[in-house]
Image (cartoon, helix red, strand yellow):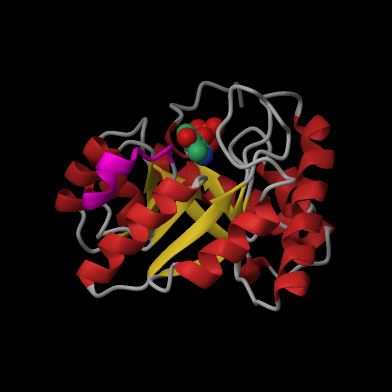
């Protein structure tokens, strides 16, 4: 029952954050990040009505997808080019961050006869430890993907904020939203996914315009807060 309660709490917080910023809660999708979870816990979440999950390692993801074929799966971790062949089951890959990966994914997607959904990962905070394109490269990179990768469908961008106090992430999310809007305008495209916000900072991310939050710990934590 803990998982169900956690899910309800997260959904409640999503709703509140949406309201605070005058947004419709239905414009925000919750992605359950299952990397810390057992299969039993994933099953509980699925039974409670959550149907879209993310993993950040290909091997773990492949096993999970076999066990939960009726859920939808996203890939959110950094992706090695030689692992691209395992990516067919993913509805969306959040971590397109370099040209060699775009080429490899496009070639595979063509073989699969699939239009592969991708997000461009942008390192807005400029942290050396994080992957993602530099903000100065995003536009030309995206243009190149749009032109030369007919089997990739760019659906938006993804970013990770530094692990700091939630409120301190706000400028990063605000800047990411600005980039998301201006790229669509400059490139003449229409996207549906701005993936930002995790357990630590999803409420701020929603206030700043996230359309998808990636949440792990808050769903699976074994509640040890005092009530
Ligand atoms: C693990 C992970 C998350 C979820 O993190 P939590 O803090 O547990 O919510 C989100 N996005 C990515 C890319 C991750 O690797």
Residue 111: image location, x then y, percent: 21, 68
Residue nearer the viewer, 138 or 181: 138
Compared to residue 73, the image places residue 116 above or below, namely below
* Total labels drawn: 0
Quadrant containing the N terminus is top left
Residue nearer the viewer, 66 or 225: 66
Name the residue at 38% across, 71% down.
151
Residue 162: image location, x then y, percent: 68, 28
Quadrant containing the C terminus is top right
Q: Where is residue 188, by image quadrant?
A: bottom right
- 222 falls in the magenta region: no
Is residue 103 something one can see in this rendering? yes
Relative to 198, is 41 on the left or the right?
left
Which contiguous range is marked in magenta? Answer: 77-85
Q: Where is residue 193, by image quadrant?
A: bottom right
- 84 falls in the magenta region: yes
Residue 14: image location, x then y, percent: 65, 54
Residue 125: image location, x then y, percent: 73, 33
Name the residue at 42% across, 34% down.
220
Name the residue at 81% across, 48% down.
175
Residue nearer the viewer, 187 or 77: 187
Relative to 7, is 175 on the left or the right?
right
Is residue 218 something one can see in this rendering? no
Relative to 214, is 112 on the left or the right?
left
Compared to residue 184, the image places residue 63 above or below, namely above
Name the residue at 81% across, 40% down.
170
């Amino acid at each position: 029952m803990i998982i169900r309660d956690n899910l309800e709490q997260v959904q409640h917080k999503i709703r509140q954050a949406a309201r605070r910023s005058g947004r419709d809660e239905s414009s925000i999708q919750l992605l359950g990040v299952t990397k810390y979870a057992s299969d039993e816990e994933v099953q509980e979440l699925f039974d409670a009505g959550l149907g879209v999950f993310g993993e950040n390692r290909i091997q773990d993801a492949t096993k999970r997808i076999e066990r939960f074929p009726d859920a939808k799966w996203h890939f959110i971790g950094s992706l090695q080019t030689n692992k691209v062949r395992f990516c067919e089951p993913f509805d969306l890959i959040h971590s397109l961050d370099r040209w060699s990966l775009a080429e490899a994914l496009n070639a595979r997607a063509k073989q699969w006869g699939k239009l592969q959904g991708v997000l461009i990962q942008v390192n807005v905070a400029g942290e050396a430890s994080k992957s993602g394109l530099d903000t100065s490269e995003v536009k030309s990179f995206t243009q190149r993907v749009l032109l030369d990768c007919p089997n990739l469908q760019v659906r938006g961008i993804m970013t990770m904020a530094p692990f700091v106090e939630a409120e301190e992430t706000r400028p990063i999310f605000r800047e990411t939203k600005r980039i998301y809007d201006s790229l669509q305008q400059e490139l003449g495209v229409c996207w549906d996914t701005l993936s930002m916000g995790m357990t630590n900072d999803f409420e701020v991310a929603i206030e700043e315009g996230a359309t998808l939050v990636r949440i792990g710990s808050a769903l699976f934590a074994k509640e040890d807060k005092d009530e």
